[in-house]
Image (cartoon, rainbow, N blue to C red):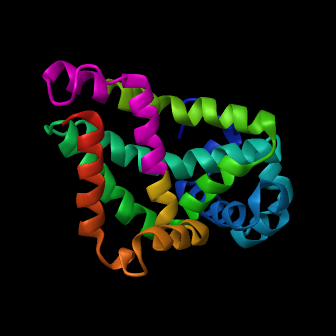
């Protein structure tokens, strides 16, 4: 879970199995219906709990949504943090991340669609809270990666670390959506052909060539 908690202590006191069941069902509901249309009654019913119990765990629907997003996105971030600790150069780590994105996005489509839904949500206050909490970690990781690579001479020294990290994260985000959501899948096929999802290796090689040339590697 994220450092900032959006749930009450009562949610921590229930079994891990029950917590995961509630959150997994909620991921599907929010991913498929969006924050506004998602029905907490439906989530409670499928999870085998009362709506009253649900609101003992979470003060508001917004807090419930934030907890669900934390749960889903943190699963990917834990994997990425493992990659960042590997004894690889900058481009080796980036390639690992691209491959993880391909596999993780296919296996966890509801989580990625939830993330996509989150970025299109019209609730300004909710999005402000989400972006501040969820993007800060990845921003720092990628900025640090690029800054270190510049010092090591792996990439060009005149690269803007912050802007490059922002663009790199956007590339990763688009790839996640392209392997998990209908719109982005169709969009990727328009650019790269109908067989693009049958040749992951070609995508990895092309992405890495693009990144190397962009960063002077």
Q: Is residue 54 left or right of residue 98?
A: right
Q: x%, y% of residue 4?
A: 61, 30
In the rendered image of this protein, does residue 174 appear above or below residue 108? above
Near-viewer residue (154 or 148): 154
Near-viewer residue (137 or 174): 174
Q: Residue at x 81, y 60 (%)?
A: 40
Q: Residue at x 29, y 22 (%)?
A: 147
Q: In this view, does 63 lie to the left or right of 41?
A: left
Q: Which residue is drawn at 45% across and 30% down?
A: 139
Q: x%, y% of residue 26?
A: 68, 61
Q: In this view, does 201 lie to the left or right of 53?
A: left
SS majority, magenta: helix
Res 214 → quadrant: top left
Q: Residue at x 35, y 44 (%)?
A: 80
Q: x%, y% of residue 156?
A: 22, 26
Q: Which of the image's four quarters has the C terminus?
A: top left
Q: Can see residue 129?
A: yes
Q: Does the magenta stretch include residue 158?
A: yes
Res 117 → quadrant: bottom right
- Please report the bounds of the magenta region as a residue range: 145-173
């Amino acid at each position: 879970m994220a450092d900032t908690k959006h749930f009450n202590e009562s949610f921590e006191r229930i079994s891990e199995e029950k917590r995961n069941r509630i959150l997994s069902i909620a991921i599907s509901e929010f991913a498929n219906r969006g924050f506004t249309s998602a029905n907490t009654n439906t989530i409670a019913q499928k999870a085998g709990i009362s709506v009253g119990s649900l609101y003992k765990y979470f003060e508001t629907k917004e807090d419930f949504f934030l907890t669900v997003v934390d749960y889903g996105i943190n699963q990917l971030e834990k994997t990425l943090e493992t990659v960042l600790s590997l004894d690889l150069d900058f481009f080796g780590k980036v390639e690992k991340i691209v491959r993880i994105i391909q596999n993780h996005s296919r296996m966890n489509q509801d989580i990625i669609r939830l993330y996509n839904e989150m970025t299109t949500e019209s609730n300004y206050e909710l999005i402000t809270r989400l972006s501040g909490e969820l993007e800060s970690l990845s921003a720092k990781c990628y900025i640090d990666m690029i800054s270190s690579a510049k010092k090591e001479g792996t990439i060009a020294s005149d690269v803007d670390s912050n802007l490059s990290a922002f663009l790199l994260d956007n590339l990763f985000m688009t790839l996640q959506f392209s392997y998990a959501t209908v719109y982005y899948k169709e969009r990727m096929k328009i650019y790269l052909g109908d067989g693009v999802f049958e040749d992951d290796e070609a995508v990895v090689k092309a992405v890495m060539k693009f990144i190397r040339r962009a960063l002077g590697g």
